[in-house]
Image (spheres, rainbow, N blue to C red):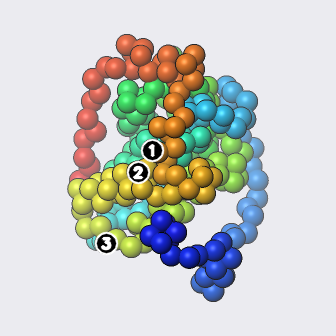
């Protein structure tokens, strides 16, 4: 972004600033066994709509009210399809939010997640099976296996949550959606040739015979969706 504005900046200069701020790598945690049953092999996304990843991040409004946010992003284009704050989010809410994303972007072939209770719930598993979406569960306590969403959450916390005073749930929804739109449309990514995710996605459409494109046209993914009820 500095170069886009006409400044001269190198990677080593930015690295020196990071070291000066004392940014550290967290220590490793004890590993556990998987609880969710994967229906697909661990795979690296090779095209748009190939692998989505999802996870939760938590915060709070100024007076201590809980904020729980579901993130869904495309591992290939780095587009954030869902970034929704609620007081509480259960498996039914997860399904409703992902249905909205699928109606707009098409269904992924795979979806990667941790072993959180919302992601291994029976109703969610049944819905994913009905939509022919394969699941990839990471090893518990191994967030690096879900590195794309973890990387996004780190930037999201640094560039939004830690900078904003969010007083109400409504304010949080507005501020966070503004961040999502800016992240998708403006923020450059080195892994995308310093393009913003939406610009990269525009240059990389779904494969002509791709799964996601075919699923996007499916009538079952175009149903009207129930709105989530805000929690006090």
**Mark 2, other Cα within 10 Å: few <14 / some 14–19 / many ≥20:** some
> Which residue sits at x=39%, y=20%?
221
Residue 217 in picture, x, y percent from top left:
41, 16
Q: Earlier in the sequence, mark 1 or mark 3?
A: 3
Mark 2, residue position: 185
Where 127 falls versus 202 (above or below)?
A: above
**Mark 1, other Cα within 10 Å: few <14 / some 14–19 / many ≥20:** some
Residue found farthest to the bottom: 20
Closer to us: 211 or 63: 211
Residue 151 in picture, x, y percent from top left:
59, 57
Residue 165, numbered circle: 3
Label 1 close to label 2 by CB (< 8 Å): yes
Q: Earlier in the sequence, mark 3 or mark 2?
A: 3
> Which residue sits at x=50%, y=16%?
214
Q: Nearer the viewer, mark 3 or mark 2?
A: 2
State the CA–CA distance, disc 1 to disc 2. Answer: 5 Å
State the CA–CA distance, disc 3 to disc 2. Answer: 24 Å
**Mark 3, other Cα within 10 Å: few <14 / some 14–19 / many ≥20:** some
Residue 91 in picture, x, y percent from top left:
44, 36
- Kindly state the secondary structure of the residue where label 1 is placed: helix
Mark 1, residue position: 198
Does residue 112 appear anywhere in the picture? Answer: yes
Does residue 125 appear anywhere in the picture? Answer: no
- Position of 150 with respect to 94 (left or right) is right
> Which residue sits at x=54%, y=35%?
204
- Kindly state the secondary structure of the residue where label 3 is placed: loop
């Amino acid at each position: 972004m500095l170069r886009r504005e006409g400044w001269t900046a190198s990677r080593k200069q930015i690295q020196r600033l990071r070291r000066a701020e004392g940014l550290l790598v967290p220590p490793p945690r004890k590993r556990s066994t998987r609880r969710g049953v994967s229906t697909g092999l661990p795979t690296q996304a090779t095209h748009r709509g190939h692998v989505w990843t999802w996870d939760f991040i938590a915060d709070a409004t100024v007076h201590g009210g809980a904020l729980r946010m579901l993130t869904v992003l495309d591992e290939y284009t780095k587009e954030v399809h869902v970034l929704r704050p609620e007081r509480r989010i259960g498996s039914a809410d997860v399904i409703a939010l992902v249905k909205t994303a699928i109606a707009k972007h098409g269904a992924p072939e795979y979806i990667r997640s941790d072993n959180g209770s919302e992601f291994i719930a029976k109703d969610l598993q049944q819905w994913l099976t009905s939509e022919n979406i394969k699941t990839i569960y990471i090893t518990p306590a191994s967030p690096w296996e879900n590195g794309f969403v973890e990387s996004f959450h780190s930037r999201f916390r640094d560039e939004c949550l830690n900078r904003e005073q969010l007083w109400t749930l409504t304010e949080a929804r507005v501020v966070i959606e503004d961040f999502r739109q800016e992240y998708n449309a403006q923020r450059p990514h080195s892994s995308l040739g310093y393009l913003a995710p939406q610009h990269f996605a525009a240059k990389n459409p779904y494969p002509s015979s791709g799964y996601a494109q075919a699923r996007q046209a499916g009538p079952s993914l175009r149903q009207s969706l129930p709105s989530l009820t805000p929690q006090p």
